[in-house]
Amino acid sequence: MSEVKSFRKPYNPPVKKMTWWLENSFYTKYMIREGTAVLALFAVLEIVFGIFMLALCDIGPIPTLSGIAPYAWYLQNFLGNPVIIALNVVVLVSQLYHAITWFALMPSAVRVFMNKNSTELLPRWIITAGLYAALAGATVVILGVAFLTV
Amino acid sequence: MEATQKTMKVTVLRYRPEQDKEPWEQTFDVPYHKDTSVLEALFYIKDNFEPSLSFRWSCRMAVCGSCGMMVNGVPHLACKTFLRDYEGKDMKIEPLANFPIERDLVVDLSDLIEKIERIKPYIIPDAKNANMPLNKNFKQTPMQMEAYLQFAQCINCGCCYAACPQYKLNPKFIGPAALTLLYRYNTDNRDAGAKLRAPFLNSEEGAWSCTFVGYCSEVCPKHVDPSSAIQLGKKMSATDYVFNMIKPEH
């Protein structure tokens, strides 16, 4: 045993379990990215609701809502509602924020060398550019199908 | 020259366990010029105002990893951070976040050290190469070396743990530096220890506790990019899981 008296008394700073993500803008941006998942859920429920209304039109005698077929009601009264339009704009902006920040982060999860004998890594921008190209491709296909079937 | 010397208000978090209940702030006017580092500012304070101020340092050149601390809330090496970059602002120096404070700017890093030891941070050769001299069967091509070299640059300064909100919320998380070293050794073609490290990588407090906040990579003074190593570790862990499903070990 040492003769020297120890004054050791480590101090543990308190952890703010609920508000830690407000301490630093990097954390806040991360939490906004995670939070966009909630808005993505809204978009998914909206589509599921639309499919449900479409299915209602297909079950024999068509029930009506305010005198029109369910799917027409969904298109006009639901999707046409200014509140829903405003919500959809917010959802779109949030998903773009998610995509932009995620595409910037994604190259960290990929480690590919230029070729078999190279010591040079595939540059980050190529991976990010590939993701934007995939996003553009998917958008063109979806919009194309939408316009062709209208 | 002397007449134009600038000064900065530098606030340091003090904690003296023998007399303080909790940390408190002390502010000093520190003169600086274009090459004054935060570490030198601390020396100036210690030499001129507060001889009892405690902080860790050794190499003064971002090699030893001793002087990790929070500068205006961001983890930095004091020796690699310069007052000129904070011109016009005040500076606040605090001990590295997410670790218990021992005294002033000195924190207890034993949790970090234990986790680094836990993941077996050394080359474990296969049975055939065991006890072979390292120059025998361990030649590497430049590419084989490049595969892990970036992740071998870690100096164990602890800045990534101070940056990690997951470690803040769950101290059981093995954390960025240790998981990066785990990936570094698993990726080394001279190493055959991946199976021994798998339980740590695959566990709840291993790679899967990381939610890819990415702040560790932002603050790493050696550009190791721990968040990259952890995401690649997740890939390793998932592959291991699938292979074990198809062909169980036991």
Image (cartoon, coloured by chain):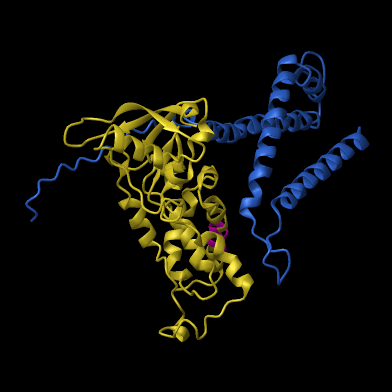
Chain colours: A blue, B yellow
Q: Residue at x 62, y 76 (%)?
A: B141
Decide which of B69, B186 is in the foreground and name it: B69
Q: Say if the magenta span includes residue B237.
A: yes
Q: In the figure, residue A36 lies in which quadrant?
A: top right
In this view, B148 is above or below A34: below
| Residue B190 image offset from top left, x and y in percent | 51, 76
Q: Residue at x 53, y 58 (%)?
A: B233
- Residue B169 visible in the shown view: no
| Residue A128 image offset from top left, x and y in percent | 72, 47
**Seen in the image, is A149 located left or right of residue A48?**
right
- Residue A103 visible in the shown view: yes
Q: Main secondary structure of the magenta part?
A: helix
The quadrant the C terminus of chain B occupies is: bottom left
Q: Residue at x 9, y 49 (%)?
A: A4
The range drawn in magenta is B233-239
Decide which of B246, B57 is in the foreground and name it: B57
Say how many tags the image has. 0
